[in-house]
Each structure stands twice: as structure tokens, then as C-alpha cells.
Amino acid sequence: MDLSRDAAADLDARDPLAGFRSRFTGAGDDGPGRLLYLDGNSLGRLPADTPAAVAEVVQQEWGSGLIGSWADWVQRSRRIGDLLAAGVLGARPGEVLLSDSTSVNLYKLLVAAADARPHRDVLVCCADDFPTDRYVVAGVAGSRGMTVRDVPADIDDGLDLDVLAAALDERVAVVVLSQVAYRSGALVDIAAVTRLARDAGALVVWDLSHGAGAVPADLTAAGADLAVGCTYK
Ligand SMILES: Cc1ncc(COP(=O)(O)O)c(C=O)c1O
């Protein structure tokens, strides 16, 4: 790989996403003391349109519209969900909603999925997965008298599907898994895992937080059961 400055400038010049840079505050600063913000945690650069959009919601929609704005706010959950479904997730209209936080949504879907497999008593998750996901899995298991089965993953290679397959049996109700591992960026094949889980009679709840919009996720084609994600990556 050519690591020269010219090669980097050439890649920049051909980057199809380059035009989006100017939509974020601070990105126009190309001076020598500029901040190079490469942090992968959950607070990206501020989109330039956001302050005005937030002010509009507070000053006009709340300040002037009062409860007259509620109908539109409620519809937005579905309207924006439909945009994400079509543009990012490969899901069908009406299948995606914007609501709550990732952990709250994971809790809701996990409980519903466990209810749908009433005679099974094991939840499977990845030992390397995002901590709050694992806490939700442990909490749901604890409150229902279920057992958590942790599947190991390699920091470089990600999750080995044979290892996952070995953890799936007739006791497993639900598998909770991230499409993209938050520490390594390792990618999991949604369709392949869904097939494995289905063969074992289990459901999968996907965490798409680090995947949605960054890597393809054709949920309908993959036959995905349930998924959560977040809007702030
Ligand atoms: C992969 C992943 N899952 C879950 C969460 C938890 O999200 P929340 O704080 O919205 O519950 C995060 C937050 O960064 C995350 O990156």
C-alpha cells in the first residue's frame, strides 16, 4: 500500500463521500493545528444543520405548536424508520421505528423473542460484544431464570461461525449479536448466522449500531428476525 501524501491526496480526490465533509462543523478547518477526530465512540462531529433543526423543534414546534405538534412527532418515528428501511437496512415499509435508546430497545426485543421461545432457557451472546448489550442479556436471563452462554470471538478475526454453531442447541431461545464488532470492526454475516440460529430453532436479535450505514445490511434478504441500532454513529 502506498502510504505517501500524494497517494492519500489522490484517494481523497476520488472519495465519493468527500462532499459530505462540508456538512459537519469543524471539518472545514484544514490549518496546521486542526483536530483530527478519529474517535469511534458514540459522539461524531456535529452536523452543521443540527443546531437550527433543534432550535426549530424547541422554538416553533414546541413553543408555538404545543400539542398540535404531537401528531407529526409521532408520525416521524415511522416516517424516518421507513427512510432507514429503504435506504440503509433493506427492510420493508413499517418494519423500522425510531424510539428510545439502543439498550431499551434491545431489552424490549429480547424479552419478546424469549417469550416467543417459552420452553427454552438459554440466551447466547458474544463474549466480546458491547458491554451494555451483555448487561441487558445477563439481566433478562437473571430475571427469567435463564442461562447465558458466552461465545468467544477473536479480536482480529471476529466470531467463528463453527464456534457459534457449537453453542446452538435445543435449549437456546435467542442469540444477541452485533453485525460489526465494536472493538475490532470484524463483520458477521447476518444471513449465515440467521440460518444457523433458525436451524437450531432460535431467534436472533441483531445490534446494528456499528454496521447500519457503514456496511450493507439487507435484512429482508438475510431473513433477519429482529434488530436494534442507534442513530448517533
Ligand atoms: C454496539 C452498541 N450497542 C449498544 C450501545 C448502547 O447504546 P445506548 O446507550 O443508546 O443504550 C452502544 C452505544 O454506544 C453501542 O455502540
Image (cartoon, rainbow, N blue to C red):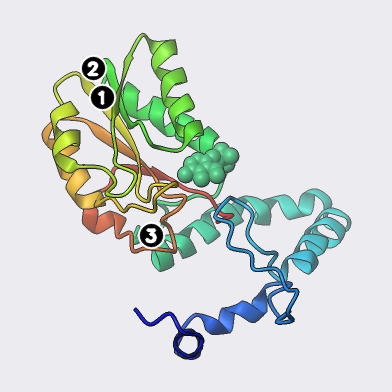
Tell me where residue 123 sits by quadrant. top left
Q: Amino acid at mark 1?
A: Ala
Q: Which residue is mark 2?
A: 120
| x and y, in percent, of residue 116 in the image | 29, 25
In contact (CB < 8 Å): disc 3 and disc 2: no
> In the rendered view, would you say 132 is above or below 188?
above
In contact (CB < 8 Å): disc 1 and disc 2: yes
Q: Evaluate whether residue 100 shows in this view.
A: no
| x and y, in percent, of residue 41 in the image | 57, 50
Say whether disc 1 or disc 3 marks the residue closer to the N-terminus.
Answer: 3
The numbered dot on residue 173 is 1
Q: Amino acid at mark 2?
A: Arg
Q: Estimate the spatial distance between the alpha carbons at disc 3 and disc 2, rounded to whole Å.
A: 29 Å
Query: How many C-alpha atoms fall within 10 Å of the one at disc 1: few (<14), some, or many (≥20)?
Result: many
Say whether disc 1 or disc 2 marks the residue closer to the N-terminus.
Answer: 2
The numbered dot on residue 89 is 3
Query: How many C-alpha atoms fall within 10 Å of the one at disc 2: few (<14), some, or many (≥20)?
Result: some
Residue depicted at 48% across the width and 33% down the height: 131
Q: Amino acid at mark 3?
A: Leu
SS of the residue at dot 2? loop
Q: Evaluate whether residue 209 shows in this view.
A: yes
Q: Estimate the spatial distance between the alpha carbons at disc 1 and disc 2, rounded to whole Å.
A: 5 Å
* Residue behind label 3 places its C-beta within 8 angstroms of ligand 1: no
